[in-house]
Image (spheres, grey):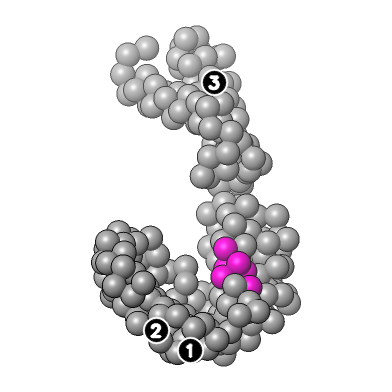
Amino acid sequence: MAGLPVVVTSVITAVALLGWLEVLLRPTPRRGLATDGRWFTILVLFSAWALINWGALLVGLSSDAGRVLLRVQWVLVAANVIPAYLIYRPVSRDIRRARRCLKHGDLDRAAAAYQRVLDSGRRGERPRAALGLGFVLMRRGDLDEAATALQRAIDSGSPNIAAQAAYDLGCLLEEQGDIEPGQVPVPVLVFHGGQDRMVPSDHGASLAARCPDAELWLRPDDGHVSVLGSCGVAALDWLVAHV
């Protein structure tokens, strides 16, 4: 039993055990192993693969039973390909085109590409397209249409996409609040990270521009959360000076 087959089977077994530990100890992990049927299918097939490998090693790879188990092993490997493809399958051409247009600031073409996916794309890509369309429409200023697209992403049933869409929709509704920035009668400090991927920095600049007495701190190297660390203490000092 010594040799490369034992090493390979041991690695497969360790990976399967780690997967089951994640399911048992973390019911809602970041990857959703416990709730995502595709991941769970891969885990079950992977575990069966490990067990069959050990069985083939125990009875002998050259025996009749060992050869049968090896054939079953390759069937399981092939079966793993299907759920793996459903998870990692490449996005459609329209999704890639929309991302390129967004990267280059062409919001109209990006919105059109995302809309094509929503109208005729694969069902599995529609939640991602709805989220992308909502983000593009927010940046373009079409807030009512953006809210509709983000709500569609929330209703899609995809946990990660729904969470991101809910956050974006919350920011949008806050921006549509009853109090207009121009009506704020006190000094306002707006600080925003230039690398923020969740809320574009031009939102902060727009908010500061609409307040009568606002100061904008744009931190080009900070992101959505890190800006709090770099500006937190200075912001408190600013607040004390303006009280």
Instruction: Give me the disc on residue 52.
Output: 3
- For the C terminus, the quadrant is bottom left
Tell me the mark number nearer the camera, choosing from 2 and 3.
Answer: 2
Are the residues flagged by discs 2 and 1 in contact, CB closer than 8 Å? yes
Q: Position of residue 49 (x, y in %)?
A: 54, 27
Magenta stretch secondary structure, dominant:
helix
Give the Cα separation between the discs numbered 3 and 1.
67 Å
Q: Earlier in the sequence, mark 3 or mark 1?
A: 3
**Which corner quadrant of the image does residue 220 belong to?**
bottom left
Q: Residue at x 67, y 65 (%)?
A: 153
Q: Label 2 sits on what residue type?
A: Ala
Q: Label 1 sits on what residue type?
A: Arg
Which residue is at the front of the view, 154 or 21? Answer: 154
Q: Which residue is mark 1?
A: 210
Label 1 crowd bin: few (<14), some (14–19), many (20+), radius 10 Å? some
Are the residues flagged by discs 3 and 1 in contact, CB closer than 8 Å? no
Q: Label 3 sits on what residue type?
A: Ile
Left or right of residue 192: residue 117? right
Q: Which residues are magenta?
A: 167-173
Are the residues flagged by discs 2 and 3 in contact, CB closer than 8 Å? no
Give the Cα separation between the discs numbered 2 and 1.
8 Å
Q: Is residue 112 visible?
A: no
Q: Position of residue 106 (x, y in %)?
A: 49, 89
Residue sitting at the far top: 59
Label 2 crowd bin: few (<14), some (14–19), many (20+), radius 10 Å? some
Q: Which residue is mark 2?
A: 214
